[in-house]
Amino acid sequence: MNTGQGCEIKAIEFVFPQKVVTNSDLSKEFPDYNFSLFEAKVGIKNRYVVSGGETALDLAKQACDQLFKNIDQSNIDYIIYCTQSPEYILPTSACILQDLLSLKTNIGALDINLGCSGYTYGLTVAKGLILSGQATNVLLVTAETYSKYLHPGDRSNRAIFGDAASATLVGECSNEGIGKFVFGTDGSGYNKLIIKNGGGRNSYQTNADLLSYGTDNLYTDNHLYMDGPEIFNFTSEKVPRIVNDLAEINNLKMPQINQTICHQANAVMLELIRKKCKISKDSFYIDLADGGNTVSNTIPIALKRYSQGLDQSETVALVGFGVGLSWCGGIINLKHKL
Protein backbone atom coordinates (compact mmCIF):
# COMPACT_ATOMS: atom_id res chain seq x y z
CA MET A 1 0.00 0.00 0.00
CA ASN A 2 1.07 3.57 -0.64
CA THR A 3 1.87 5.04 2.76
CA GLY A 4 2.80 8.44 1.34
CA GLN A 5 0.59 11.18 0.00
CA GLY A 6 1.68 11.12 -3.61
CA CYS A 7 4.21 9.97 -6.18
CA GLU A 8 7.03 11.51 -8.16
CA ILE A 9 9.50 10.95 -10.96
CA LYS A 10 12.61 9.72 -9.18
CA ALA A 11 15.00 9.03 -12.06
CA ILE A 12 15.20 8.99 -15.88
CA GLU A 13 17.72 7.48 -18.29
CA PHE A 14 17.62 7.37 -22.08
CA VAL A 15 19.62 5.85 -24.93
CA PHE A 16 20.02 6.34 -28.66
CA PRO A 17 21.17 3.73 -31.17
CA GLN A 18 24.81 3.98 -32.21
CA LYS A 19 24.09 4.82 -35.84
CA VAL A 20 23.78 8.57 -36.40
CA VAL A 21 22.29 10.18 -39.53
CA THR A 22 23.36 13.80 -39.96
CA ASN A 23 21.87 16.44 -42.20
CA SER A 24 24.98 16.12 -44.30
CA ASP A 25 24.27 12.41 -44.75
CA LEU A 26 20.71 13.14 -45.89
CA SER A 27 21.84 15.89 -48.24
CA LYS A 28 23.85 13.30 -50.18
CA GLU A 29 20.70 11.23 -50.68
CA PHE A 30 18.53 14.25 -51.44
CA PRO A 31 20.87 16.77 -53.12
CA ASP A 32 18.03 19.01 -54.31
CA TYR A 33 16.91 19.84 -50.76
CA ASN A 34 18.45 22.57 -48.59
CA PHE A 35 19.21 20.84 -45.29
CA SER A 36 20.99 23.93 -43.94
CA LEU A 37 17.70 25.79 -44.14
CA PHE A 38 15.91 22.77 -42.66
CA GLU A 39 18.27 22.75 -39.68
CA ALA A 40 17.80 26.46 -39.03
CA LYS A 41 14.02 26.22 -39.32
CA VAL A 42 13.09 22.84 -37.85
CA GLY A 43 15.95 22.67 -35.35
CA ILE A 44 17.16 19.12 -35.99
CA LYS A 45 20.85 18.50 -36.67
CA ASN A 46 20.99 14.73 -36.47
CA ARG A 47 18.92 11.71 -35.59
CA TYR A 48 19.84 8.18 -34.51
CA VAL A 49 18.47 5.04 -36.16
CA VAL A 50 18.70 1.33 -35.45
CA SER A 51 20.62 -0.93 -37.78
CA GLY A 52 20.42 -4.57 -38.71
CA GLY A 53 18.23 -6.62 -36.40
CA GLU A 54 18.21 -4.06 -33.59
CA THR A 55 14.73 -3.41 -32.18
CA ALA A 56 12.92 -1.01 -29.87
CA LEU A 57 13.02 -3.67 -27.16
CA ASP A 58 16.81 -3.83 -27.45
CA LEU A 59 16.94 -0.07 -26.84
CA ALA A 60 14.44 -0.40 -23.98
CA LYS A 61 16.65 -2.93 -22.21
CA GLN A 62 19.69 -0.67 -22.62
CA ALA A 63 17.80 2.28 -21.10
CA CYS A 64 16.62 0.13 -18.18
CA ASP A 65 20.11 -1.26 -17.59
CA GLN A 66 21.37 2.32 -17.43
CA LEU A 67 18.66 3.20 -14.91
CA PHE A 68 19.48 0.18 -12.76
CA LYS A 69 23.04 1.37 -12.27
CA ASN A 70 21.64 3.82 -9.72
CA ILE A 71 18.43 2.19 -8.45
CA ASP A 72 17.60 -1.23 -7.03
CA GLN A 73 15.70 -3.17 -9.68
CA SER A 74 14.36 -5.59 -7.08
CA ASN A 75 12.00 -2.82 -5.91
CA ILE A 76 10.21 -2.61 -9.28
CA ASP A 77 6.67 -3.96 -8.96
CA TYR A 78 5.10 -2.83 -12.26
CA ILE A 79 6.24 -2.28 -15.86
CA ILE A 80 4.46 0.09 -18.22
CA TYR A 81 5.97 -0.20 -21.70
CA CYS A 82 4.88 2.45 -24.19
CA THR A 83 5.65 1.61 -27.82
CA GLN A 84 4.26 1.54 -31.33
CA SER A 85 7.25 -0.58 -32.35
CA PRO A 86 6.37 -3.88 -30.62
CA GLU A 87 8.64 -6.88 -30.76
CA TYR A 88 5.75 -9.04 -32.02
CA ILE A 89 2.03 -8.63 -32.70
CA LEU A 90 1.75 -10.85 -29.64
CA PRO A 91 2.86 -11.48 -26.91
CA THR A 92 3.03 -8.23 -24.97
CA SER A 93 6.51 -6.73 -25.20
CA ALA A 94 6.41 -5.70 -21.53
CA CYS A 95 6.31 -9.39 -20.58
CA ILE A 96 9.44 -10.06 -22.62
CA LEU A 97 11.11 -7.02 -21.05
CA GLN A 98 10.42 -8.39 -17.56
CA ASP A 99 12.35 -11.54 -18.45
CA LEU A 100 15.18 -9.67 -20.22
CA LEU A 101 15.70 -7.55 -17.12
CA SER A 102 15.50 -10.57 -14.76
CA LEU A 103 12.85 -8.80 -12.70
CA LYS A 104 10.77 -10.71 -10.17
CA THR A 105 7.69 -12.47 -11.52
CA ASN A 106 5.13 -11.18 -9.00
CA ILE A 107 4.82 -7.85 -10.85
CA GLY A 108 2.43 -6.37 -13.37
CA ALA A 109 3.49 -5.69 -16.98
CA LEU A 110 1.54 -4.10 -19.81
CA ASP A 111 2.03 -2.33 -23.12
CA ILE A 112 0.54 1.03 -24.08
CA ASN A 113 0.17 1.62 -27.81
CA LEU A 114 0.49 5.39 -27.93
CA GLY A 115 2.84 7.72 -29.76
CA CYS A 116 3.80 11.28 -28.90
CA SER A 117 1.36 11.52 -25.98
CA GLY A 118 2.49 8.17 -24.60
CA TYR A 119 4.85 9.38 -21.89
CA THR A 120 2.34 11.68 -20.24
CA TYR A 121 -0.35 9.00 -20.47
CA GLY A 122 2.11 6.54 -18.93
CA LEU A 123 2.72 8.89 -16.01
CA THR A 124 -1.01 9.01 -15.28
CA VAL A 125 -1.26 5.20 -15.27
CA ALA A 126 1.78 4.95 -12.99
CA LYS A 127 0.29 7.56 -10.66
CA GLY A 128 -3.02 5.70 -10.53
CA LEU A 129 -1.31 2.41 -9.68
CA ILE A 130 0.70 3.98 -6.90
CA LEU A 131 -2.02 6.12 -5.31
CA SER A 132 -4.46 3.18 -5.37
CA GLY A 133 -1.96 1.02 -3.51
CA GLN A 134 -1.43 -1.41 -6.38
CA ALA A 135 2.26 -0.56 -6.84
CA THR A 136 5.09 1.28 -5.10
CA ASN A 137 7.77 1.61 -7.79
CA VAL A 138 6.68 1.67 -11.44
CA LEU A 139 9.12 1.29 -14.32
CA LEU A 140 7.80 3.46 -17.16
CA VAL A 141 9.58 2.64 -20.43
CA THR A 142 9.22 4.30 -23.82
CA ALA A 143 10.87 2.89 -26.95
CA GLU A 144 10.39 3.59 -30.65
CA THR A 145 12.05 2.65 -33.92
CA TYR A 146 9.97 4.62 -36.42
CA SER A 147 12.93 4.40 -38.81
CA LYS A 148 11.77 0.86 -39.61
CA TYR A 149 8.47 2.27 -40.87
CA LEU A 150 9.88 4.98 -43.16
CA HIS A 151 10.28 4.56 -46.91
CA PRO A 152 13.86 5.28 -48.05
CA GLY A 153 12.47 7.95 -50.39
CA ASP A 154 10.47 9.74 -47.67
CA ARG A 155 12.79 12.69 -47.22
CA SER A 156 10.51 14.72 -44.93
CA ASN A 157 9.86 12.02 -42.33
CA ARG A 158 13.39 10.65 -42.46
CA ALA A 159 14.63 14.16 -41.62
CA ILE A 160 12.29 14.47 -38.64
CA PHE A 161 12.05 11.10 -36.89
CA GLY A 162 14.72 9.28 -34.90
CA ASP A 163 14.88 6.19 -32.70
CA ALA A 164 15.41 6.08 -28.94
CA ALA A 165 14.30 4.59 -25.63
CA SER A 166 13.86 5.90 -22.10
CA ALA A 167 13.37 4.40 -18.65
CA THR A 168 11.70 6.30 -15.81
CA LEU A 169 11.27 5.30 -12.19
CA VAL A 170 7.98 6.59 -10.75
CA GLY A 171 7.68 5.98 -7.01
CA GLU A 172 5.70 7.00 -3.97
CA CYS A 173 6.65 10.11 -2.01
CA SER A 174 5.35 12.20 0.88
CA ASN A 175 3.92 14.99 -1.27
CA GLU A 176 2.26 15.58 -4.62
CA GLY A 177 5.17 15.24 -7.00
CA ILE A 178 2.87 14.49 -9.93
CA GLY A 179 -0.20 16.71 -10.15
CA LYS A 180 -3.39 16.61 -12.16
CA PHE A 181 -3.58 15.85 -15.90
CA VAL A 182 -5.86 16.77 -18.77
CA PHE A 183 -6.63 14.47 -21.70
CA GLY A 184 -7.98 14.64 -25.21
CA THR A 185 -8.81 12.29 -28.05
CA ASP A 186 -10.08 12.92 -31.59
CA GLY A 187 -10.19 9.58 -33.39
CA SER A 188 -11.66 11.20 -36.50
CA GLY A 189 -8.07 12.18 -37.31
CA TYR A 190 -6.71 8.63 -37.04
CA ASN A 191 -5.60 8.64 -40.69
CA LYS A 192 -3.49 11.79 -40.39
CA LEU A 193 -0.56 9.77 -39.08
CA ILE A 194 -0.88 6.12 -39.98
CA ILE A 195 0.64 2.89 -41.27
CA LYS A 196 -2.29 1.37 -43.14
CA ASN A 197 -0.97 -2.13 -43.81
CA GLY A 198 0.20 -4.87 -41.48
CA GLY A 199 -2.61 -4.89 -38.93
CA GLY A 200 -6.01 -6.51 -38.75
CA ARG A 201 -7.70 -4.21 -41.29
CA ASN A 202 -5.18 -4.46 -44.14
CA SER A 203 -2.52 -7.13 -44.51
CA TYR A 204 1.08 -6.30 -45.42
CA GLN A 205 1.45 -6.10 -49.21
CA THR A 206 4.63 -7.41 -50.77
CA ASN A 207 4.17 -5.29 -53.91
CA ALA A 208 2.40 -2.25 -52.49
CA ASP A 209 1.88 0.69 -54.84
CA LEU A 210 4.44 3.48 -54.61
CA LEU A 211 2.75 6.71 -53.56
CA SER A 212 3.88 10.29 -53.00
CA TYR A 213 2.95 13.30 -50.91
CA GLY A 214 4.20 16.85 -50.56
CA THR A 215 7.26 17.55 -52.66
CA ASP A 216 8.34 14.18 -54.05
CA ASN A 217 8.19 12.28 -50.74
CA LEU A 218 7.71 8.58 -51.44
CA TYR A 219 5.92 5.91 -49.39
CA THR A 220 3.62 2.90 -49.66
CA ASP A 221 0.75 1.86 -47.44
CA ASN A 222 3.25 -0.46 -45.74
CA HIS A 223 5.09 2.65 -44.52
CA LEU A 224 4.34 5.56 -42.20
CA TYR A 225 2.33 8.39 -43.70
CA MET A 226 1.94 11.77 -42.00
CA ASP A 227 -0.30 14.60 -43.17
CA GLY A 228 2.03 17.34 -41.96
CA PRO A 229 -0.26 20.33 -42.53
CA GLU A 230 -3.20 18.68 -40.76
CA ILE A 231 -1.03 17.60 -37.81
CA PHE A 232 0.29 21.15 -37.60
CA ASN A 233 -3.25 22.58 -37.60
CA PHE A 234 -4.35 20.12 -34.92
CA THR A 235 -1.39 20.99 -32.73
CA SER A 236 -1.72 24.75 -33.09
CA GLU A 237 -5.39 24.52 -32.12
CA LYS A 238 -5.33 22.02 -29.25
CA VAL A 239 -1.98 22.37 -27.46
CA PRO A 240 -2.21 26.02 -26.32
CA ARG A 241 -5.55 25.16 -24.70
CA ILE A 242 -3.93 22.24 -22.88
CA VAL A 243 -1.35 24.49 -21.23
CA ASN A 244 -4.02 26.91 -20.02
CA ASP A 245 -6.25 24.04 -18.83
CA LEU A 246 -3.33 22.54 -16.90
CA ALA A 247 -2.79 25.74 -14.97
CA GLU A 248 -6.48 25.98 -14.13
CA ILE A 249 -7.01 22.36 -13.03
CA ASN A 250 -3.90 22.51 -10.83
CA ASN A 251 -4.93 25.86 -9.30
CA LEU A 252 -1.94 27.66 -10.75
CA LYS A 253 -1.42 30.96 -12.52
CA MET A 254 0.67 30.73 -15.68
CA PRO A 255 3.65 32.58 -14.09
CA GLN A 256 3.77 29.87 -11.40
CA ILE A 257 4.72 27.29 -14.05
CA ASN A 258 8.51 27.59 -14.17
CA GLN A 259 9.02 25.52 -17.33
CA THR A 260 6.92 23.99 -20.09
CA ILE A 261 8.24 20.89 -21.83
CA CYS A 262 6.18 19.79 -24.82
CA HIS A 263 6.64 16.85 -27.14
CA GLN A 264 9.64 17.86 -29.23
CA ALA A 265 8.05 17.65 -32.68
CA ASN A 266 9.87 20.46 -34.47
CA ALA A 267 11.02 23.96 -33.61
CA VAL A 268 8.51 25.70 -35.86
CA MET A 269 5.56 24.04 -34.16
CA LEU A 270 6.99 24.59 -30.69
CA GLU A 271 7.61 28.28 -31.32
CA LEU A 272 4.02 28.69 -32.46
CA ILE A 273 2.77 27.02 -29.27
CA ARG A 274 5.02 29.18 -27.13
CA LYS A 275 3.82 32.41 -28.71
CA LYS A 276 0.14 31.42 -28.52
CA CYS A 277 0.56 30.64 -24.82
CA LYS A 278 2.53 33.88 -24.29
CA ILE A 279 5.36 32.02 -22.56
CA SER A 280 8.88 33.49 -22.48
CA LYS A 281 11.68 31.63 -24.23
CA ASP A 282 13.38 30.98 -20.88
CA SER A 283 10.27 29.15 -19.64
CA PHE A 284 9.66 27.03 -22.72
CA TYR A 285 12.11 24.21 -23.40
CA ILE A 286 13.20 23.39 -26.94
CA ASP A 287 15.96 20.85 -27.42
CA LEU A 288 15.64 18.51 -30.40
CA ALA A 289 18.85 19.26 -32.29
CA ASP A 290 20.45 16.02 -31.11
CA GLY A 291 17.99 13.19 -31.75
CA GLY A 292 15.06 14.79 -33.55
CA ASN A 293 11.48 13.64 -33.02
CA THR A 294 11.75 10.38 -31.09
CA VAL A 295 7.97 10.11 -30.54
CA SER A 296 7.13 9.02 -26.96
CA ASN A 297 10.76 9.51 -25.93
CA THR A 298 11.03 13.26 -26.53
CA ILE A 299 9.53 14.39 -23.22
CA PRO A 300 11.61 12.13 -20.93
CA ILE A 301 14.76 12.99 -22.90
CA ALA A 302 14.02 16.73 -22.66
CA LEU A 303 13.08 16.43 -18.98
CA LYS A 304 16.30 14.59 -18.18
CA ARG A 305 18.38 17.15 -20.03
CA TYR A 306 16.58 20.11 -18.49
CA SER A 307 16.88 18.74 -14.95
CA GLN A 308 20.69 18.67 -15.17
CA GLY A 309 20.73 22.45 -14.70
CA LEU A 310 18.23 22.42 -11.84
CA ASP A 311 19.30 24.18 -8.64
CA GLN A 312 15.90 24.49 -6.93
CA SER A 313 12.44 22.93 -6.97
CA GLU A 314 10.37 23.88 -10.02
CA THR A 315 6.83 23.44 -11.28
CA VAL A 316 6.97 21.94 -14.78
CA ALA A 317 4.21 21.40 -17.34
CA LEU A 318 4.56 18.32 -19.57
CA VAL A 319 2.46 18.19 -22.75
CA GLY A 320 2.28 15.31 -25.24
CA PHE A 321 0.32 15.34 -28.48
CA GLY A 322 0.17 13.55 -31.82
CA VAL A 323 -0.83 10.28 -33.46
CA GLY A 324 -4.33 9.15 -32.63
CA LEU A 325 -5.14 11.99 -32.60
CA SER A 326 -4.30 12.13 -28.93
CA TRP A 327 -3.11 14.63 -26.36
CA CYS A 328 -2.32 14.63 -22.64
CA GLY A 329 -0.64 17.09 -20.31
CA GLY A 330 0.24 17.21 -16.63
CA ILE A 331 2.06 19.15 -13.93
CA ILE A 332 5.02 17.77 -12.01
CA ASN A 333 7.05 19.14 -9.12
CA LEU A 334 10.66 18.73 -10.20
CA LYS A 335 12.76 18.70 -7.04
CA HIS A 336 16.14 17.35 -8.14
CA LYS A 337 18.28 16.31 -11.06
CA LEU A 338 16.98 13.19 -12.71
Image: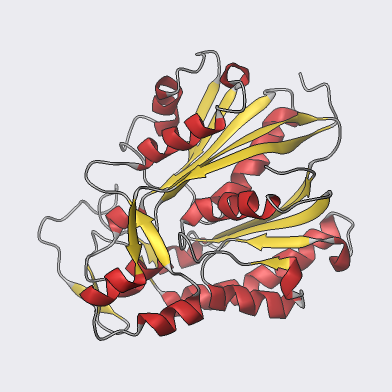
Give the quarter of the figure containing the C terminus: top right
For residue 241, side relative to residue 148 (left or right): right
Tell me: residue 11, above or below residue 78. below
How was this image coloured? secondary structure
Q: Quadrant of residue 218?
A: bottom left
For residue 270, side relative to residue 307 (left or right): left
Give the quarter of the figure containing the N terminus: top right
Q: Position of residue 114 (x, y in %)?
A: 49, 49
For residue 229, side relative to residue 263 (left or right): left
Q: Is residue 102 visible?
A: yes
- Tell me how many marks there are: 0
Q: Position of residue 167 (x, y in %)?
A: 54, 38
Q: Is residue 161 visible?
A: no
Tell me: residue 330, above or below residue 5. below
Q: Residue at x 40, y 82 (%)?
A: 36
Q: Position of residue 48 (x, y in %)?
A: 37, 56
For residue 106, side relative to residue 308 (left or right): left
Q: Quadrant of residue 77?
A: top right
Q: Residue at x 67, y 55 (%)?
A: 306
Q: Residue at x 40, y 65 (%)?
A: 46
Q: Position of residue 178 (x, y in %)?
A: 76, 43
Between 174 and 2, which is closer to the camera in this rendering? 174
